[in-house]
Every structure is written in C-alpha cells, then in structure tokens.
Amino acid sequence: MRRQFDDVMLGSLELFCLAAELESFTAAARATGLSPPAVSRSIARLESRLGVNLFVRTTRQIHLTDSGRTYFEHCRQALGLMRDAESQLTGEHRAPSGLLRISVASPYGHYRVLPLLPRFRERYPRVQIDVHLSNRNIDFAGEDFDVAIRGRTPPDSSLIARKLEDAELVLVAAPSYIARAGRPDTLPSLDAHDCVHFVLPSTGQSVPWLFRHEGRDIELNPPATFRCTDDYLGTVTLARQGAGLLQTYRYVVQEDLAQGRLLELLPESGGRSRPFSLIYPSRHHAALRVRALIDFLVAELAGERHP
C-alpha cells in the first residue's frame, strides 16, 4: 500500500486538531512548545495539500470554516482511534488517576460543574477531586491548581483558555418587591429602584449590568442598595427575599422563574451574556486526568452550543 501520510503530515493533523479545539494558533503553540509561526506554517501545509481553507483568520482569533469543521470531526475521531489502538497493542492500560484540583467561580460551580462531577468520577474512579469554589483569581504556580473555570479572560497570556459557553444574563426581582416598588419599565428607571450588586474580589468594584436595547449594547451600574462580596449566591438569596432588582445568570434562577419566586424584568433589553472558559497552564495539558476532565466538561457544556 502506498504511503499517504508521513510523520510531518501526521504532526500537522495533530496541530490542526489542537488549534481547532483551542481556537488559537498561539494557544496550540504554547501547549506543544512550538512557536506560533511554526503552527501557522504547519496548518498552511495542510490547507495546501487539501486545497481548501480550514480556518477563517482574523487579527484576534480563528474560526473553523464549514470544510474545516467537517475535517476536524473526522481527524479527531481518527486520531482517537489511533491512540486507542496503540494503547491496546502495547498492553498499556493506563487510566486517569491521581488528584485533580479545580477552582470554579461559585455560581458556575454550583449550577453547572458540581452536578456533572459525580458522573465524571463514575467514569474515572481512580481520580480524586478537590473543588475550590471562589470568585477570586488564583495563582496556578503558587496554589498548584490543575484547572480553573472563570467568567472572564485571564490576564496571564501564558494560560490556555478553552471556552465552554456564553451564559445568558437576566434581570429579576421577587413578586414582593414588585408589589412594593413597582416594575421598572425602562433602563433609566433602574436608578430609582433598590438594586443588589455583586462585588468582584479582584477589583473591589460592582459587576456592571449588561443590556442590549434597540440593537445597542449598554453597560449600566445603577446605585447599589445591597452589595455582596465573595459569595455570589448571597445576591440571589437577597433578591428572593424582596431586597431589590438583580441581574444574574439565567441558569442560576431558571427554577425560581419557573416557580414564580422571581419575575423576569425588561426582557426586551435582555440577550446579553458572559463567556465562561476552562483555564489551565500548558504544562498541565498533558496530564491524563486533566485531559480527561477537559474533554468531559467540553463535551457536556460546550457541546450544548453545537448539538
């Protein structure tokens, strides 16, 4: 049989899949110890061989083309089969094991990640998990975490960020508050209401409220009647008790909305979201237990964006 793939081409396929997963040539370079130009050249060779563009490139990011997405799915499956075959033939029965240390922003942890971890543990029973629920930025080097999940882009460019989802924001209040203070009917009217804010530990500032009105993105910071620091879920408890208006994530209050404990306000100005991403140092990417967790969470959470 004529040989179709040399070592260079197989390496290009692996780099292509990694760049597609991370949505960044730079992140793929950090994860593999190569330079970004080397990754770019490798992808360009692959595109030249195929005669199609695999990525749409901009100055800030890359996105798979339709052809690229199709090719990515096939390549990912093929590389997975090759790894499985190699493991079986060499008699290597490795399974993820050891301690995983995860830091998760508290609301995302309670409502999105913690419900999934028992299923992850059933799949990988040799892994032990320490979960750190906090809204402060962590120091990977000093605190020895494997993975963090945050709602903002990390300032440290040496970290790899893998997007999980865009979490929709919603403005809510309890029926008791609406009965007492009335329902806001415009964005400017928010200043006349009691408002509950969460204060970011890293900045000491209230998180701004995000809206989209008549096609324009608007950022507001109405006067705070109540401010909560550290424990984000304290804001939700206050809102349920009629303390005032709160902008929070829909996934946090969807059951309250369904049961009528909270009411959605100004839906015509909604639709904004914040991204949540997996963040980890490139050196941790190779650990089997870390890779298993990344693949699991991406399939469970990011997979909801692309069913």
Image (cartoon, grey):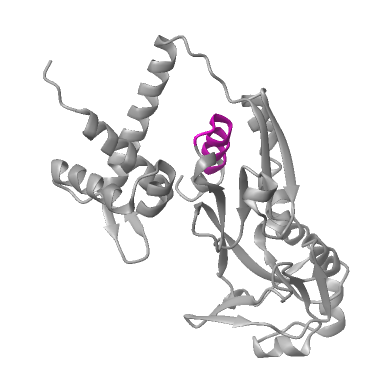
Which of the pair 189/229 is nearer the observer?
229
State the extent of the magenta-drawn residues as a range.
286-298
Q: Position of residue 281 (x, y in %)?
A: 54, 47
What residue is at 79 percent from the left and 81 percent from the top?
224
| Residue 290 magenta-highlighted | yes
In this image, 223 relative to 65: left or right?
A: right
Identify which residue, 8 or 273, lies in the foreground: 8
Q: Main secondary structure of the magenta part?
A: helix
Q: Is residue 222 above or below residue 230?
A: below
Q: State whether residue 174 appears in this view.
A: no
The percent position of residue 296, horizontal first and vertical second, equals 55, 36
Q: In the displayed orientation, state which residue is furthest to the front.
A: 142
- x%, y% of residue 68? 28, 46
Placement of 261 over or under 65, stated as above or below: below
- Quadrant of image for the N terminus: top left
Q: Residue at x 62, y 42 (%)?
A: 146
90 on left or right of 220: left
Indicate the position of residue 122 as horizontal and vertical percent values: 66, 25
Q: Is residue 51 above or below residue 210?
A: above
Q: Is residue 7 above or below residue 252?
A: above
User: Is 237 inside the magenta-drawn segment?
Assistant: no
- Furthest toward the left, the residue is 2
Q: Residue at x 79, y 60 (%)?
A: 233
Residue 132 in sight here: yes
